[in-house]
Image (cartoon, helix red, strand yellow):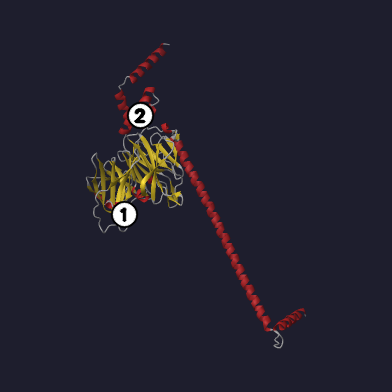
Amino acid sequence: MASEEIKSKKQRNDECIINCLPEDLIERIFLRLPVSTLLRCVSVCKHWHNFIRDPQFVVSHLQCAPRDVLLFFQQESVSGEPYPSDAILIDEAWSPSTCAVPVIGPDDFLFGSCNGLLGLYTKTSTIKVANLATGECLHLEKPAKNVKGDHFSFYSFAFHPVTKEYKITHFLGDCVEGRPHNKDRFSTIQVYTLGDEKWKDIRTPEALSLISVRNSGVVNVDGKMYWLTEEMLSSWQHAVMSFDLWEESFAMIQLPAACEDHDYFGPRKFWIRDIDGKICIVTAQTSRYGPKALAGELQIWTLDNTVEQQRWSQKYNIKNPPNYIPGPHFVHRDRILAQLCSDNVYAYELFGENCDVNLCKGVNLLDFSPRKPYNMQSYICVKSHVRLDVYKKAGIVRRPKQLEGWQLKKWETWKCRLSKLADLQCRMHKFEHHLLEVAETMGKRCQFLKDKQHNIAEHVLTELKQVLQHKPDNPDQPLSIRRLNWVGSRIGSSRS
């Protein structure tokens, strides 16, 4: 009895010590903890649970969380060998993480990263919002299913700092033969707010180019979505279109004054990117001998938004640039992510406004072989404990399963699907081979019948010539009588 009283008294003292800690001290401690530790602390006591789940603390922890680089490689086939979608995290020390990213499935396409949440979709009918750290996933229906020509750059995922709402947008291509076709132009942007029951269609002021969106990309900054569009009367014959996710209004921003292009280079390429939360235009001329190779200098312009005006300023002028500009984030902590001619991804340190990639100090991040070049996306991401179960009325929320078992099930399912596909292809190959054998046999039979018909015709012609040589000739009789007499004589001779 005394031992129980001592134990309960000690427990009350411990609880008193924990609860008597200053709130700011608890907050400072918790802000330094990773999400995985915070999730374990939630179940310690009710006080900690309420503190960690408080929306204000979630925002504060998000702001203090380290910014990592996420490199994404979408599914592809190399020399007939399938490779699933995959992602690699690069930490602040520019070291690739050995941990897997389990929320990304083998058939997923990544289209956005926002506050620790990833926006993913499949080719069929599903959009998935996944928490990178907790593994929690929200599954939604796509606004348009099986759209021909769909591309990851036609989707976007953003957070509005004023309304505190997460938005998913989709560029819906104009109809071709009565069916949406993401090919040339679009006149509708489909918008979905997490928690709503349905998508909303917003008409654009005019039909805009989908090709420019696919080639240059889309970025989200401060609750607005930006992309490049063709504008023949503007500088560089391009302009920046913006779409306010709150007011649902459009605006056009002119590009900086165009510099004179060199005649010995090819046409100019443009990309829109996000560098340190600012809109950036990246442009360079291409080589005359290869449309994918960049030549000359890579110019990077940033847009400074002030109350009075919007002003472009040149941030970098890079000589000997890389041939591929991954997006939407390719400059992080004054390093440029470069995918060179080799099968490696480098991070080159940028010294000042004017620099040469060949002279910059670089870090070899990873070898992406045997994957194809020009197929990598780069995002800045954080690990947060933003909850998705608050949106469960609008979609299906799935809790994370055990990592190893979940990964095993994921890859087993994918391999099983590939096995079935390979079996179907094998059967089709055997069927085609059988059809070829049947066609070859029929061809031989047809040729045999043709040869036999030819031989019979030759034999009949020979017999006929021999018969006609012994035909009686009496010119005094009519032709019909002569034929009858000749036939009769032939019958008589055959009987005898």
Q: Position of residue 48 (x, y in %)?
A: 36, 24
Depth check, front residue: 201 or 477: 201
The quadrant in which the C terminus is found is bottom right
Q: Residue furthest front?
A: 205
Q: Position of residue 174 (x, y in %)?
A: 41, 49
Residue 476 shows up from this direction: yes
For the residues labelled 2 and 1, say whether their Cβ atoms are less than 8 Å apart.
no
Numbered disc 2: secondary structure: helix
Q: Residue furthest top?
A: 2
Residue 330 shows up from this direction: no
Q: Position of residue 2 (x, y in %)?
A: 41, 11
Position above or below: 477 against 155: below
Depth check, front residue: 472 or 446: 472
| Whole-number angstrom distance, CA of label 2 to CA of label 1 | 47 Å
Q: Amino acid at mark 1?
A: Ala
Label 1 neighbourhood size at 10 Å, few (<14), some (14-19), many (20+)?
Answer: some
Depth check, front residue: 104 or 412: 104
Quarter assignment of residue 64: top left
Instruction: Tell me which numbered mark, 2 or 1, is placed earlier along the sequence.
Output: 2
Q: Residue furthest bottom?
A: 476
Q: Amino acid at mark 2?
A: Pro
Numbered disc 1: secondary structure: loop
Count of numbered badges drawn on the protein: 2
Residue 107 relative to residue 303: left or right? right
The quadrant in which the N terminus is found is top left
Foreground disc of the pair 2, 1: 2
Position above or below: 82 against 53: below
Tell me the residue at 30%/43% (across/down). Answer: 274
Instruction: Quickly name the residue at label 2.
Output: 55
Q: Position of residue 236 (x, y in %)?
A: 28, 52
Instruction: Quickly name the residue at label 1.
Output: 293
Label 2 neighbourhood size at 10 Å, few (<14), some (14-19), many (20+)?
Answer: few
